[in-house]
Image (cartoon, grey):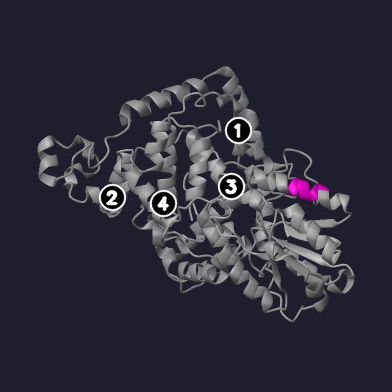
């Protein structure tokens, strides 16, 4: 068989605004027919941040993607194999000379996988063309130019979904020998994924993504400003697009342009316009945080400011961790948020920040293990955003204001009537309003009257909130005051701080990923309301 082109789908499960697919189809006359591949990679699904809900969401997206490709005559080959094995099999069958994919800023395992793929393509003299998907620039050297680069990327018209019939019988004939085992889609059990899956999580696929986008643009955006902080209003006030962006059912550029177009409509109520403009700002932050991991992959596992090494590492308390992950801390707003998260795969950003803050300060837990647990709980887990936020909320970036969320105050501010707490914590439904947000303070007589016993029916707080928080802040600030920590702050700012200068940066082309810093710069020193 003559040469072919292989389009490798990863976290970009769509055909609209898909640069690798569009480019490959434009080159069929000179480079041969197109083969479409998705790998179910056992090595990636074995990682501790992978979860059953992620896998099932991906399968839903793949079913949708397969239908989109079938409309233009292209089959989607879903192979149960690690990337190098799958590429080797397809190379033998099709002799592809070009591999096309989007750049990916994922976890450490996908980073190592991509390095190995780069070496494999070089060894086999295959051209690997990687194209940007978000407003994240690989090899960016000057952080001051990033914001304008993001605007340039978002300003280009999205690529239309391909049309026509691109079927080529030579492709299916060449791949007829693929073994049934490689083509068989494994179950979540076969991949060793945990049994937990939220019963009310969002469902994957582009059709679902577009439905969510349209409902936000046309209706729900009016509640965005002022509605995204409370866990009562946030489920509908937030856009709820985050999992669809994570797995690429829609492109960032599509969402940005659709949001800006909707905001420009003259008949749009002012409240909706304000919500849409605020949403664009947060889409900018989405890429801004991913850019940090692109710059410095190690922030997934190492303190961004290494002057904070040793702050929490030696003080792990498994009792505290178990209380957090099982929703048994004794603080109603925290435990209700965990209950909602386990049932839906989603909570709003303020509650996410509160969970991390409680873990980092009164419970004094290191961000890495807490972050790994939360990664499995968030359907929209995006490594670039996730690990930066874990460190920011835990105080180890060295450049951000200390963020300590008091769960009692959060309940007073965002659930004053206790509706959220009672919804997710049935044991508290009989507790009087006076004691609902701090039920451990109920007198014995009140406990008897309402039939809720502290320490039996509901947990006693694992630590004294005020004392533990005060001690944690003191420990953090003692570290922060040290000369070497203060001196190291400048280098973190230079590497990661958000800057708004104009940008005329040059791309470095498709790198071979031979350096540890494949990812390049961005961090806010004040951003506190990142949310979808």
CB-based contact (under 8 Å), mark 4 and mark 1:
no
Q: Which mark is residue 383?
A: 3
Marks 4, 3: nearer the viewer: 4
The magenta stretch is 114-119
Q: Secondary structure at mark 3?
A: helix
Work out whether residue 330 or residue 155 is closer to the camera in this orientation and state it.
330
> Label 4, label 3: how many angstroms apart (C-alpha)?
18 Å
The answer, for residue 321, to whether it is visible in the render is yes
Q: Which residue is mark 4?
A: 341
Query: Residue 303: x percent and y percent?
Result: 58, 32
Looking at the image, which residue is at 42% across and 47% down?
350
Q: Which residue is mark 2?
A: 425
Q: Which secondary structure dominates the residues rendered in magenta?
A: helix
Q: Is residue 253 above or below residue 118?
A: below
Is residue 186 rendered magenta in the image? no
> Label 2, label 4: how many angstroms apart (C-alpha)?
13 Å
> Label 1, label 2: how many angstroms apart (C-alpha)?
35 Å
Q: Earlier in the sequence, mark 3 or mark 2?
A: 3
Query: Residue 246: x percent and y percent?
Result: 58, 56
Q: Which residue is mark 1?
A: 302
């Amino acid at each position: 068989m003559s040469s072919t082109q292989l389009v490798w789908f990863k976290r970009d499960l769509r055909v609209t605004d898909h640069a690798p697919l569009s480019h490959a189809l434009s080159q069929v006359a000179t480079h041969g027919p197109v083969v479409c591949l998705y790998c179910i990679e056992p090595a990636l699904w074995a990682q501790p941040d992978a979860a059953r809900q992620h896998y099932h969401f991906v399968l839903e997206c793949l079913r949708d993607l397969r239908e989109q490709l079938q409309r233009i005559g292209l089959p989607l080959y879903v192979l149960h194999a690690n990337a190098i094995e799958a590429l080797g099999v397809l190379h033998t069958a099709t002799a592809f000379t070009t591999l096309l994919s989007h750049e990916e800023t994922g976890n450490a395992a996908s980073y190592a996988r991509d390095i190995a793929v780069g070496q494999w393509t070089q060894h086999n003299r295959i051209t690997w063309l990687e194209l940007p998907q978000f407003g994240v620039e690989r090899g960016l050297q000057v952080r001051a130019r990033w914001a304008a680069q993001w605007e340039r990327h978002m300003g280009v018209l999205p690529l239309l979904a391909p049309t026509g019939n691109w079927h080529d019988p030579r492709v299916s004939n060449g791949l007829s020998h693929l073994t049934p085992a490689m083509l068989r889609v494994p179950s979540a059990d076969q991949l060793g994924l945990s049994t937990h899956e939220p019963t009310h999580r969002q469902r994957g696929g582009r059709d679902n993504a577009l439905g969510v986008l349209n409902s936000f643009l046309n209706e729900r955006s009016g509640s965005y400003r002022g509605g995204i902080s409370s866990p009562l209003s946030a489920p509908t006030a937030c856009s709820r697009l985050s999992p669809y962006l994570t797995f690429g059912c829609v492109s960032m550029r599509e969402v940005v342009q659709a949001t800006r177009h909707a905001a420009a409509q003259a008949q749009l109520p002012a409240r909706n316009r304000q919500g849409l403009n605020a949403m664009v700002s947060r889409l900018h932050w989405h890429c801004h945080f991913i850019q940090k991991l692109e710059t410095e992959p190690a922030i997934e596992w190492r303190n961004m400011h290494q002057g904070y090494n040793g702050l929490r590492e030696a003080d792990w308390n498994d009792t505290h961790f178990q209380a957090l992950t099982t929703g048994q801390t004794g603080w109603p707003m925290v435990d209700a948020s965990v209950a909602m998260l386990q049932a839906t795969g989603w909570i709003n950003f303020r509650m996410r920040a509160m969970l991390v803050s409680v873990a980092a300060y009164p419970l004094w837990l290191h961000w890495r293990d807490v972050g790994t647990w939360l990664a499995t709980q968030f359907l929209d887990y995006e490594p670039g955003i996730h690990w930066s936020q874990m460190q920011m909320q835990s105080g180890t970036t060295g450049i951000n204001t200390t963020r300590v969320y008091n769960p009692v105050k959060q309940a007073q501010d965002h659930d004053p009537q206790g509706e959220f707490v009672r919804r997710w914590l049935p044991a508290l439904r009989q507790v009087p309003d006076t004691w609902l947000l701090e039920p451990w303070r109920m007198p014995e007589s009140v406990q008897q009257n309402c039939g809720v016993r502290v320490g039996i029916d509901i947990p006693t707080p694992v630590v004294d909130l005020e004392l533990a928080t005060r001690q944690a802040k003191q420990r953090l600030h003692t570290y922060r005051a040290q000369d070497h920590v203060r001196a190291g702050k400048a280098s973190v700012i230079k590497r990661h701080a958000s800057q708004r200068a104009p940008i005329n940066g040059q791309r470095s082309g498709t790198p071979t990923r031979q350096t540890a810093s494949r990812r390049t710069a961005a961090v806010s020193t004040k951003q506190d309301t990142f949310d979808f």
